[in-house]
Image (cartoon, rainbow, N blue to C red):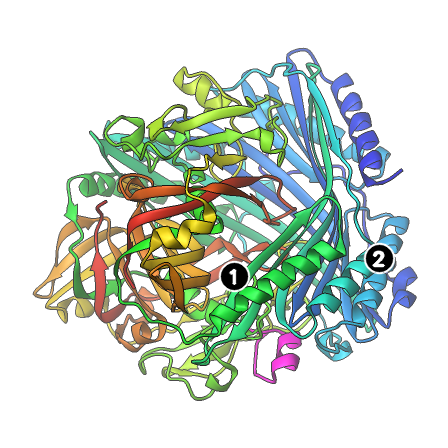
């Protein structure tokens, strides 16, 4: 019998609802969030296996509301005694901190909700053969290595199975099941002292809710051969010019642009100052909602946890709030922030269902889910044709933005100049920089629905204690007017 | 038994059971990361979130027939149950290693000896910590993060290796905010960390930070992009030195064509003779053993007088490239990263740093660094917190934040004018997944020309 990708470990049954009953009296309100997540990481390099690891994270987070303060206790001891001890610790911590609470919370921030979610998948990991999958990764590295000048060809697959169950003393009972995948296929080309890297859409962009069907090997092999050749093109390319140019960003770079300069500044907990000590504050102020012209009229940004297959799709956030699609920015006007019920109560601002935690051992905070730029009417071809002198960039490789989410500088893997309405030579080390609102106000054209692509990243860091969480971003290619671009050099 | 004692007993029992069940030709390495932490998050001197976490994660590296599989799970703390889970994972590993192709660079396990280090602390009750922090910061715009409790790292393998490290400690990492004359938010950063909590020392730290706020209340100066003479306080230098861990001094990254310091490694470039970087475990901030149980040298020079002395070499890189391991960590985000970096102090008295700067920028902290051109070790990032315009050795005004884009070859090369005589220890305050160990020790740095771009 062949070994399958799915991991079956000997884990005892756990019934969250049964575990909740004995601890109901520990607090004015109590919640229990059970999480079991199995993460597979499989990698190959230069025709050989590299890493094979699987990790199971399993535990509960107890939330206790006492005297208007909510505190948390996480434990991986799922015995009755372990749950009871965690409930007592959460209640004691709530009681101790209630004297110095920032805001008086109530059950209104944890409304009763019941429902289920099951992310889309065609091939479960139990139906995927491990040996065949590993052979696919190894073959992908061979396809990436189109020349001896490719010194590193690496393939990585991350497969994550998550089961969540949230129950509370006021009757919430939510089950959500996810199967997610992340892919990275990368070629590093070297010639003398020159090194260039090219990957399929950037090292972390290919993230979706899907099963093993996301590994259509024949299609992937073809894509790997293309990026191998493009890595070689970069070796021979000239540096990106230092100039102010019209800039077209492909969807695999738009994901980062949206994430850093729209997603993070709109998080209500940042605007409320919770993140000032770590991730930072925001240039967006409470009075900006409904008034700030964030971008040109072509800018339509939605919070959309309902887009099937996108990386951060879900039906309920970790406070039990039902998730639905909402406009954050419509026709360039800022309408709504990214904040769950706690932040909405504190700020009085409209928000969304995005109160999320990274695992059972962390309390939920305001998080992006799927933040998408709605398609427009332009084709990429028409956008290019409209540019007299410009540049087209693909795939993120460098990211940095200030703590108010204003001054950014991003780098891409691959770029081509646009001259007289046509794509021309490939240039290496393409970077650009700008300031969030002026940049978005320079949005001149937005790609059409046929060019709308969904990507994401598993590595959005935030919070104290720190949490890394999955987010999704979908967009068509977009054209921005007169952006400062530049290349490499010491 | 307390958390550390319970965890030690559980780990030993699980390890001995698992090793006893191995078959001929099988090797097993167990790594434990555990903590019991109180995490308190403050905003406006009030408690925003309070979380208590007890967690133990066991990772097993199983090797047989030239193949390797790493499996991990969160321990429940119930010995029978955890032993059953561990047994089922070993069985999975046995099956999987038959299904996987051979790994030509597999590192055979070794008995890398044993060690036991415990550093007990004197930590407050969480309720007392809350009362004291909220009390002594009342009336200020204080936002911060307090983490407290025991941390454990341990490794054992089936060949007899056995290393144990446990410590009890805390840190309070915080920011104090004010609004300046132009209506802009300005802040100073503070950190109080130790193994023994003393409320009066915490109060002194906050009072010192509060005093520094006065300078930030002045109207700020907006500086145009360009090159400036800069003094970097140690916290800012630590951020720059952090980039060395993003593959720059990794032997494997160099061989894979992914090192930002290739030119230094291959002798095409050098840094300033003032610049000395070492991995120094004598700082006592993290265990010397890695996940393979290898014990690193107490002190490993990485760059001496601007010349490369050693790259960080893990056993896997050693196996693949025929090098000699210096017990660098093979796992993690990049692998072969600095765990306890130290930049040697210089001869500029810190008290004379502003005078030596004369006219230029005092940079208290940097933020969100990333490579912008790895070929040339160029880094971009932002100024953050207490940063000032200085004229004639005197602070004139706080600045509006600036973006920089500059090469480490220049910062720690020809533009490095001096390092301070005093160095500061910066404990690692990361808490992704679990609270980190480690930290760095660096001086302040005077740089002749540093390029800001936005």
Q: Residue at x 75, y 28 (%)?
A: B87
In this picture, is B187 found above or below B372? below
Q: Position of residue B68 (x, y in %)?
A: 57, 24
Q: Can see residue B29?
A: yes
Q: Position of residue A314 (x, y in %)?
A: 59, 65
Q: Badge 2 sits on which subunit?
A: A
Q: Can see residue A218?
A: no
Choose top left, top right, bottom left or bottom right for residue A439. Answer: bottom left
Determine which residue is flagged by label 1.
A279
Query: Is the C terminus of chain A in the top left, top right, bottom left or bottom right quadrant?
Result: top left
State which region is magenta.
A338-352
**Mark 2 secondary-structure assignment:** helix
Determine which residue is flagged by label 2.
A89
Circle 1 crowding by C-alpha within 10 Å: few under 14, some 14–19, many from 20: many
Q: Is residue A342 magenta?
A: yes
Circle 2 crowding by C-alpha within 10 Å: few under 14, some 14–19, many from 20: many
Q: Residue at x 47, y 45 (%)?
A: B238
């Amino acid at each position: 019998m062949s070994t399958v990708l799915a991991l079956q470990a000997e884990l005892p049954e756990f019934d969250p609802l049964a575990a909740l009953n004995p601890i109901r009296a520990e607090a004015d309100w109590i919640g229990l969030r059970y999480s079991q997540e199995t993460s597979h990481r499989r990698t190959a390099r230069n025709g050989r296996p590299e890493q094979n690891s699987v990790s199971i994270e399993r535990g509960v987070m107890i939330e206790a509301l006492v005297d208007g303060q909510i505190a948390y206790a996480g434990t991986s001891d799922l015995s009755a005694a372990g749950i009871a001890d965690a409930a007592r610790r959460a209640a004691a911590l709530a009681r101790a901190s209630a004297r110095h609470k920032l805001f008086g919370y109530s059950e209104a921030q944890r409304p009763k909700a019941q429902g289920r979610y099951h992310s889309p998948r065609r091939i479960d990991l139990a139906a995927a053969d491990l040996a065949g999958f590993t052979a696919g990764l190894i073959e992908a590295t061979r396809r990436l290595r189109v020349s001896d000048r490719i010194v590193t060809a690496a393939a990585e697959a991350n497969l994550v199975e998550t089961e969540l169950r949230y129950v509370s003393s006021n009757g919430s009972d939510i089950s959500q099941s996810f199967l997610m995948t992340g892919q990275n296929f990368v070629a590093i080309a070297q010639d003398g002292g020159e090194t260039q890297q090219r990957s399929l859409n950037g090292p972390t962009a290919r993230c979706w809710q899907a099963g093993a069907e996301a590994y259509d090997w024949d299609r992937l092999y073809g894509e790997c051969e293309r990026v191998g050749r493009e890595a070689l093109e970069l070796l021979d390319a000239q540096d990106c010019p230092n100039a102010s140019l019209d800039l077209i960003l492909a969807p695999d770079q738009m994901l980062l642009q949206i994430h850093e300069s729209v997603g993070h500044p709109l998080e209500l907990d940042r605007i409320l100052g919770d993140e000032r000590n770590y991730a930072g504050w925001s240039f967006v102020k409470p009075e900006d909602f409904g008034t700030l012209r964030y971008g040109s009229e072509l800018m339509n940004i939605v919070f959309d946890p309902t887009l099937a297959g996108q990386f951060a799709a879900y039906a309920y956030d970790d406070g039990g709030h039902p998730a639905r699609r909402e406009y954050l920015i419509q026709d360039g006007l800022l309408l709504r922030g990214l904040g769950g019920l706690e932040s909405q109560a504190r700020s009085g601002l409209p928000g969304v269902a995005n109160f999320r935690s990274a695992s059972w051992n962390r309390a939920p905070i305001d998080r992006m889910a799927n933040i998408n730029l709605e398609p427009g009417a332009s084709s990429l071809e028409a956008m290019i044709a409209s540019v007299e002198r410009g540049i087209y960039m693909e795939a993120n490789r460098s990211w940095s933005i200030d703590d108010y989410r204003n001054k950014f500088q991003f780098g891409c893997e691959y770029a081509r100049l646009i001259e007289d309405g046509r794509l021309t030579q490939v240039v290496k080390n393409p970077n650009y920089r700008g300031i969030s609102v002026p940049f978005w106000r320079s949005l001149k054209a937005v790609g059409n629905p046929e060019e709308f692509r969904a990507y994401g990243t598993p590595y959005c860091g935030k919070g104290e204690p720190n949490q890394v969480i999955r987010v999704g971003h979908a967009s068509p290619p977009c054209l921005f007017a007169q952006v400062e671009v530049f290349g490499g050099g010491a | 038994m307390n958390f550390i004692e319970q965890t030690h007993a559980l780990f030993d029992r699980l390890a001995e059971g698992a090793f006893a069940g191995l078959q001929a030709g099988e090797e097993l390495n167990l790594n434990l990361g555990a903590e019991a932490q109180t995490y308190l998050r403050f905003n406006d001197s009030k408690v925003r979130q309070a979380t208590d976490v007890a967690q133990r994660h066991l990772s097993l590296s199983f090797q047989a027939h030239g193949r390797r599989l790493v499996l991990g799970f969160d321990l429940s703390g119930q010995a029978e149950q955890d032993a059953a889970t561990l047994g089922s994972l070993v069985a999975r590993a046995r099956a999987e290693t038959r299904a996987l192709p051979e790994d030509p660079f597999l590192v055979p396990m070794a008995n890398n000896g044993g060690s036991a280090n415990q550093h007990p602390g004197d930590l407050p009750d969480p309720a007392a910590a809350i009362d004291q922090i909220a009390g002594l910061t009342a009336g200020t715009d204080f936002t911060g993060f307090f983490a407290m409790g025991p941390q454990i790292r341990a490794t054992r393998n089936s060949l007899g290796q056995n290393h144990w490290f446990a410590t009890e400690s805390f840190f309070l990492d915080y920011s104090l905010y004010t609004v300046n004359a132009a209506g802009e938010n300005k802040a100073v950063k503070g950190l109080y960390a130790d193994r023994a909590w003393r409320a009066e020392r915490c109060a002194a730290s906050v009072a010192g930070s509060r005093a520094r706020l006065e300078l930030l209340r002045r109207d700020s100066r907006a500086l145009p992009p360009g090159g400036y003479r800069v003094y970097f306080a140690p916290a800012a230098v630590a951020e720059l030195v952090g980039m060395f861990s993003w593959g720059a001094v990794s032997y494997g990254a160099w061989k894979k064509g992914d090192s930002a310091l290739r030119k230094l490694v291959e002798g095409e470039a050098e840094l300033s003779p003032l610049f000395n970087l070492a991995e120094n475990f004598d700082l006592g901030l993290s265990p010397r053993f890695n996940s393979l149980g290898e014990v690193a040298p107490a002190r490993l020079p990485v760059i001496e007088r601007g010349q490369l002395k050693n790259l960080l070499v893990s056993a896997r890189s050693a196996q693949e490239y025929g090098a000699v391991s210096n017990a660098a960590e093979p796992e993690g985000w990049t692998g072969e990263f600095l765990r306890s970096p130290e930049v040697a102090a210089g001869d500029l008295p810190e008290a004379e740093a502003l005078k030596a700067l004369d006219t230029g920028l005092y940079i208290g902290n940097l933020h969100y660094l990333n490579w912008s051109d790895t070929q040339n070790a160029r880094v971009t990032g932002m100024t953050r917190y207490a940063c000032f315009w200085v004229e004639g050795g005197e602070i004139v005004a706080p600045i509006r934040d600036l973006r920089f884009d500059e090469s480490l070859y220049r910062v720690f090369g020809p533009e490095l004018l001096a390092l301070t005589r005093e160095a500061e220890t910066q404990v690692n305050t990361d808490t992704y997944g679990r609270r980190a160990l480690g930290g760095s020790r660096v001086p302040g740095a005077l740089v002749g020309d540093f390029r800001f771009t936005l």
